[in-house]
Amino acid sequence: MVGDNVENPGIYSLREALKIADALDLDLVEISPKADPPVCRVIDYSKFLYQQKKKQKEMKAKTVQVVVKEIRFGPQTDDHDFNFKLRHAEKFLQEGAKVKAFVFFKGRSILFKEQGEILLLRFATLLEDYGKVEQLPKLEGKRMTMFISPKKK
């Protein structure tokens, strides 16, 4: 809309802008109050709010939630149990979930820290086709933890 103001077309006084908004049955909304002069727009405010909510809902729908699946080992996990858990981890990674593999040390089994680390590293090498290691085995208290994230498709 071009104003009647000859030296600055498009610039209206507050009274003129309110008259225009009232004539069009719309709202006068201040867009940039810190500008000189302040910038206002004549719009349907309820429609504007509706569109904002719709955009936020779309943004929320597009966000991907990361699922973390845990797999627990003992320091002396047998080959059959290891392979069983390995197949589960492969399935989780193919579905797009992260895998948190950890070895839990009970009582004196903490003496076998090296065995736990070897177990987790073997687990990671067998899963290289499906995911990449995000965090190498790290001992935290009685748990040695490792994270594997899925490969991008």
Image: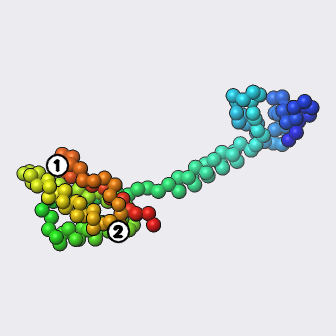
Relative horizontal placement of residue 73, taking residue 69 as reference (left or right):
left
Apparent side of residue 10 relative to residue 68 in the rendered image (left or right): right
How many residues crowd around disc 2 within 10 Å: few (fewer than 14), some, or many (20 or more)? few
Residue at image x 32%, y 58%? 133
Quarter of the rendering containing residue 121: bottom left
Nearer to me, 66 or 135? 135
The residue that appears at 81% across and 38% down in the rendered structure is 21
Crowd band around label 1 with a 10 angstrom C-alpha radius: few (<14), some (14–19), many (20+): some
Relative to 86, residue 65 above or below: above
Residue under label 1:
142
Q: At label 1, which amino acid type do we have?
A: Lys
Q: Tell me the kind of residue under disc 2.
A: Asp
In-image side of 125 versus 95 (left or right):
left
Picture residue at 31% right of the left edge, 53% below the top: 135
Q: Quadrant of the C terminus?
A: bottom left
**Image x and y of residue 37, in percent:** 77, 28
Colour scheme employed for the rendering of this structure: rainbow
- Picture coordinates of residue 136, whole percent (x, y): 27, 53
Residue 26: in sight, yes or no? yes
Rounded to the nearest whole Å, what is the CA distance between mark 2 and mark 1?
29 Å
Q: Identify the element where label 1 is drawn.
A: loop
Give the quarter of the figure containing the N terminus. Answer: top right
* In front of the other: 92 or 79: 79
What label does residue 129 carry, if any?
Answer: 2
Q: Secondary structure at mark 2?
A: loop
Question: Residue 77 appears in which quarter of the rendering?
Answer: bottom left
Contact? badges 2 and 1 (CB < 8 Å): no
In this view, 109 is above or below 1: below
